């Protein structure tokens, strides 16, 4: 199935999508592509907010703000997410959930990609409405959706590792 269709399915049945992704075998290239596409979409989602900031405060030009966001989302964020996936896997092992290193990475990276449409919405709201209650509310929805999809993916990975179906 296509990635966009899997993103749509993740909103309804995230465990099934994760089970299907794990059934395709361990493919580090696929996990990396999920992470980089998610970082790219989140980077694009920053543009409306950065344009608003540049319009309100001309001290830092828009190109410099976009360059900083580019550096952060394409160079530093992937490293941070790989480290976060490793910590997540260690925590899961500590609570006796048998999730492999790959499954932890895949669940984290897929959750980022699956909520990237909401990141785009958050960026648009931040650019149009500016900082405030509405932007914070959309941010909480993004965060909640991320943890929901991540949790469901990790449960599916743990169940698959134990030989049961999610």
Image (cartoon, rainbow, N blue to C red):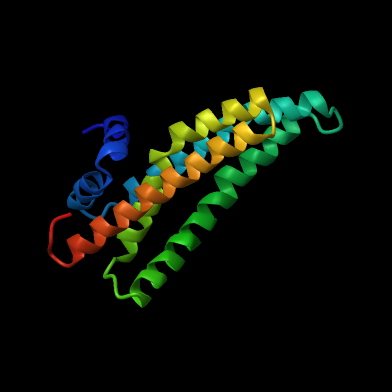
Which residue occupies the foreground of this view, 112 or 142?
Answer: 142
Task: Report whether 67 appears left or right of 11.
Answer: right
Q: Is residue 128 above or below residue 46?
A: above
Residue 43: x and y in percent read 57, 36
Q: Nearer the viewer, residue 130 or 51?
A: 130
As drawn, the residue found furthest toward the right would be 59
Q: Position of residue 119 (x, y in %)?
A: 51, 35
Q: Provide residue 35's location: percent of width, then percent of height.
A: 43, 46
Quadrant of the drawing holding the C terminus = bottom left
Image quadrant where one finds the N terminus: top left
Which residue lies at the image location 53% right of the left edge and 43% below the top edge? 140
Q: Hey, which quadrant is residue 98 in on the image?
A: bottom left
83 or 152: nearer the viewer:
152
Drawn side of residue 73 relative to residue 37, left or right: right
Image position of 6 with respect to 48: above or below: below
> Does residue 32 appear in the picture of this structure?
no
Q: Nearer the viewer, residue 79 or 135?
A: 135
Task: Identify the residue at horizontal 72%, vertical 25% (top origin).
Answer: 52
Residue 162 % position (x, y): 17, 67
The residue at 31%/58% (across/down) is 154
Left or right for 163, reference 27:
left
Residue drawn at (70%, 25%), measured in percent from left and top? Answer: 51
Residue 64 appears in the figure: yes
Quarter of image, res 61: top right
| Image label count | 0
């Amino acid at each position: 199935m296509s990635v966009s269709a899997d993103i749509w399915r993740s909103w309804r049945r995230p465990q099934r999508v994760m089970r299907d992704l794990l059934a395709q075998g361990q493919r580090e290239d696929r996990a990396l592509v999920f992470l980089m596409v998610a970082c790219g979409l989140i980077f694009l989602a920053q543009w409306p907010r950065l344009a608003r900031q540049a319009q309100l405060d001309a001290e830092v030009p828009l190109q410099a703000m976009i360059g900083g966001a580019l550096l952060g989302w394409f160079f530093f964020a992937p490293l941070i997410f790989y480290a976060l996936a490793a910590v997540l896997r260690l925590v899961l092992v500590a609570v006796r959930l048998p999730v492999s290193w790959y499954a932890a990475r895949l669940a984290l990276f897929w959750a980022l990609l699956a909520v990237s449409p909401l990141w785009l919405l958050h960026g648009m709201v931040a650019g149009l409405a500016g900082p405030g209650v509405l932007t914070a509310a959309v941010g909480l929805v993004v965060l909640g959706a991320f943890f929901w999809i991540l949790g469901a993916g990790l449960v599916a990975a743990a169940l698959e590792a134990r030989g049961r179906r999610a």
